[in-house]
Amino acid sequence: MKICVTARDFSTGGDSAVRMLREAGHEVVDLSACDMGSATSPQQVWEAVGDAQIAITGMEPYNEDVFAHCPRLQMISRRGIGYDSVELEACRRRGITLARTVGAVEGSVAEHVLACILYFARRLDLQNASMHRGEWRRVMTPGAKTRKLGLVGFGGIGREIALRARPLGMEIFYYCRHPRAEWENEYGAAYLELDELLAACDYVSVNVPLDDSTRGMFGAGRLARMKEGSILINIARGPVVDAQALRAALDSGHLAGAAVDVFDREPCTDSPLVGCPNALLTPHTATYTSENFNTMNDIAARSVLAYLAGTLEEKYIVR
């Protein structure tokens, strides 16, 4: 079986996943050093995949154009949990199985969100820079304890954030389409309607998948409804938040800060947020820890082997 790896940095943390596939007797074409992403064209993808039967993918597009040029493709193993880069209807029409690495990324993404909260809560970066300039200038920071955290989207990532924020003494609220009463006791998070959450919370973390209902979810109007002086954190997908509108909200002082890990097209070096002093920007690294990356890669590879053996668990399959 020919397996093409287009997920960027697939071998960065080690080659255990590629070795696993090769030791099982499969031909592996590892193109993970080609730095593909959401800005990659479908033509680049189909030229890379060629006649492979299986692809292990990242954020690069897999759509009808790609499938038409790769008629042997049977399975896509997505290294990650979001699948907005894959045209699901086209997969269904062509009988292509789509799998994702659920259970691997949620903890590290939640950890990233907590790091962003603490960045703005304590501003150690400013204090450190001041000390290195030979200054003794104490900075009064807002802290995280008793601050209100709003989680927009309460799936696996949202729930993991709640579990980690609770020990900080934060008040936690969430909004999602299907709230459950038991989550208040289980995660210490109370449900609020979206506009109510935005008006009340000091930190808002956006954790929703990208689809037609969430694209442009945070435009100028919704950002204006956020509490004055609050912080927006986007670890979902770039198009969920209008970057130009976010920059305007930051420049006006309505928002005190923003932490953004995802962009409309990636790699991205020209975001409207570049140069904004109260924007914390990271290059889509919420999942990017050595332990997590190796785990995701191994699950993506094991999903391929399970698919070929007819034993792929339902929880990994996108229907």
Image: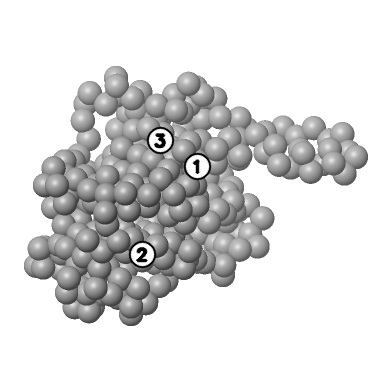
Is residue 309 among what the camera can see? yes
Which element type, helix, strand or loop, lies under badge 1?
helix
Amino acid type assigned to the residue bearing label 1 in the image: Ser
Task: Bin the neighbour count of mark 1 within 10 Å (Cα to Cα): few under 14, some 14-19, many 20 and up.
Answer: few
Instruction: Give whichever of discs 2 and 1 has the lower sequence position.
Output: 2
Residue 8 location, quadrant: bottom left
Task: Bin the neighbour count of mark 2 within 10 Å (Cα to Cα): few under 14, some 14-19, many 20 and up.
Answer: some
Q: Horizontal placement of 154 versus 319: left or right?
A: right
Measured along the vertical axis of the image, is residue 37 above or below residue 228? Answer: below
Quick one: 155 or 176, which is closer to the camera?
155
Instruction: Give whichever of discs 1 and 3 has the lower sequence position.
Output: 3
Quick one: 221 or 8, which is closer to the camera?
8
Residue at which label 1 appears: 290
Q: Horizontal placement of 40 versus 145: left or right?
A: left
Q: Residue furthest right?
A: 134
Q: Give the residue drawn at x 17%, y 74%.
A: 71
Q: Residue 226's spot in the image, x, y percent? A: 45, 47
Q: Quadrant of the N terminus?
A: bottom left
Coloring basis for residues: one colour
Q: Residue 173's spot in the image, x, y percent? A: 37, 33
Amino acid type assigned to the residue bearing label 3 in the image: Gly
Q: Residue 308's spot in the image, x, y percent? A: 16, 51
Which element type, helix, strand or loop, lies under badge 3?
helix
Q: Give the residue drawn at x 29%, y 21%.
A: 186
| Residue 90 numbered tag | none
**Which one is closest to the eye, mark 2 or mark 1?**
2
Residue at which label 2 appears: 29
Which element type, helix, strand or loop, lies under badge 2?
strand
Amino acid type assigned to the residue bearing label 2 in the image: Val
Quick one: 317 or 192, which is closer to the camera?
317
Residue at which label 3 appears: 107
